[in-house]
Image: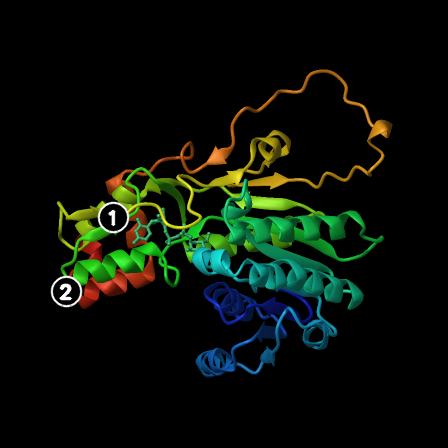
Amino acid sequence: MSSVEGPVLVTGGTGSFGSTMARRLLATGAPEIRIFSRDEAKQDAMRRDLADGRVKFYVGDVRDPRSVEDAMAGVRHVFHAAALKQVPSCEFFPQQAVLTNVNGSDNVIRAAERAGAESVVCLSTDKAVYPINAMGMSKAMMEKVAQAHARNRRENGTTVSVTRYGNVMYSRGSVIPVFIQQIKQGLPLTVTDPHMTRFLMSLDDSVDLVEYAFHHAEPGDLFVRKAPAATVQDLARAVASLFGDEDPEIRVIGTRHGEKLYESLLSREELQRAEDCGGYYRVPLDARSLEYELYFDQGESEVVHYDYTSHNAERLDVEATKRLLLQLQPVREELRAVGRNPGQLL
Ligand SMILES: O=c1ccn([C@@H]2O[C@H](COP(=O)(O)OP(=O)(O)O[C@H]3O[C@H](CO)[C@H](O)[C@H](O)[C@H]3O)[C@@H](O)[C@H]2O)c(=O)[nH]1
């Protein structure tokens, strides 16, 4: 990350995204990084871990506008990662997802605008595309709130943008650590649906995406990173193979609440308008006003009939998935802990 001037606020700052972003910002000489989150214990752990006076901690909740405003004073850039992001818990408490993901995001963007911040990058998810679960629906609404702010932006106002990413490999509570635990305990691997696919991204990939948005966003832009995908069955086999089991026992447990067979990073409507930026897609804001009769479309534009999904993205087989897994530091550590040398496993 090239150097950032002025204070930076990271909401949800003690999470895996927040701490990785904080480290990157520190490494590039950022003068002040404000970590905003609800959990004082996690803040304390992070304070000790980073041990850097440039990192300031703010206890607060994005649902509470005053706590956000207090943390926002003088801030130049905001990375908005605070969210309820567990699919099952949002399914059972959807109103809580609305409060944090929709209203909370509005509070953050509003406070940034009032404080005269230059930019806000909001973190969203592939589950916001054609959403079927409450987590995805609330994130889809967050995207709409961000875009509406961008549409109403005053000259030289805050640049609000959105990034969407897919599953972050080895993130807390996700399937890869579950498979590793099952392997260590000699249990069968629980696969929901062998044909289910997911985009696979490392934490660094997702931080790269946010950084890309930070450097390139025009108001209301939405960015996704192109990513490979795999079936959960191949993912299970890849993890097992790294731990020395080429023919693992697989128990099919069925799809869980609110799960999709595949995820979409871009809808066909978005893909139609997307700009291909190499490793990324950029979808510009639809900045038309409500007076649609003022606009006209000339000629035929090329019509896109497909979404960008984990079913039609680059598909990784077991060997390719193993290579990706071996790039993850925590997976290498898990392997070393059971006496396997990650350098000799391909
Ligand atoms: O025991 C399991 C658990 C999961 N899966 C499958 O593995 C894939 C990944 O599952 P994760 O639980 O790792 O990830 P999800 O796609 O369900 O979504 C996760 O990533 C999201 C980010 O997009 C949110 O953070 C969300 O809360 C979190 O559950 C899915 O196809 C799931 O069906 C299995 O096969 N067996």
Horizontal and vertical percent position of residue 311: 40, 34
Which residue lies at the image location 68% right of the left edge and 40% below the top edge? Answer: 284
Mark sitting earlier along the chain (2/1) = 1
User: Disc 1 designates what residue?
Assistant: 236
Q: Relative to 227, is 141 on the left or the right?
A: right
Does 69 appear above or below 341?
below
Question: In this image, 159 relative to 245: left or right?
Answer: right
Q: Is residue 88 left or right of residue 223?
A: left
Q: Is residue 221 above or below residue 270?
A: below
Does mark 2's beta carbon lie closer than 8 Å to ligand 1?
A: no
How many residues crowd mark 2 within 10 Å: few (<14), some (14–19), many (20+)? few
Q: Nearer the viewer, residue 219 or 41?
A: 41
Q: Closest to the observer: 63 or 53? A: 63
Residue 211 vs residue 235: left or right? right
Looking at the image, which residue is at 15% across and 48% down?
A: 248
Residue 198 picture location, percent across and down: 39, 44
Q: Which residue is mark 2?
A: 339
| Residue 340 horizontal/vertical position (percent) | 16, 60
Return the x and y of residue 126 as percentages of the image width and height.
Answer: 50, 46
Can residue 2 be seen? no
**Residue 18 in sight from this viewpoint:** yes
Q: Secondary structure at mark 1?
A: helix
Q: Amino acid under label 2?
A: Gly
Mark 1 is on which residue type? Ala
Q: CA distance from mark 2 to mark 1?
A: 20 Å
Looking at this view, name the residue that lies furthest to the top.
299
**In the image, is the residue at mark 1 within 8 Å of ligand 1 by its beta carbon?**
yes
* Residue under the point 79% across and 66% down: 114
Q: Quadrant of residue 1?
A: bottom right
Write down the quadrant of residue 298 in the picture.
Answer: top right
Q: Which mark is residue 122?
A: none
Provide the secondary structure element on which disc 2 rests. loop
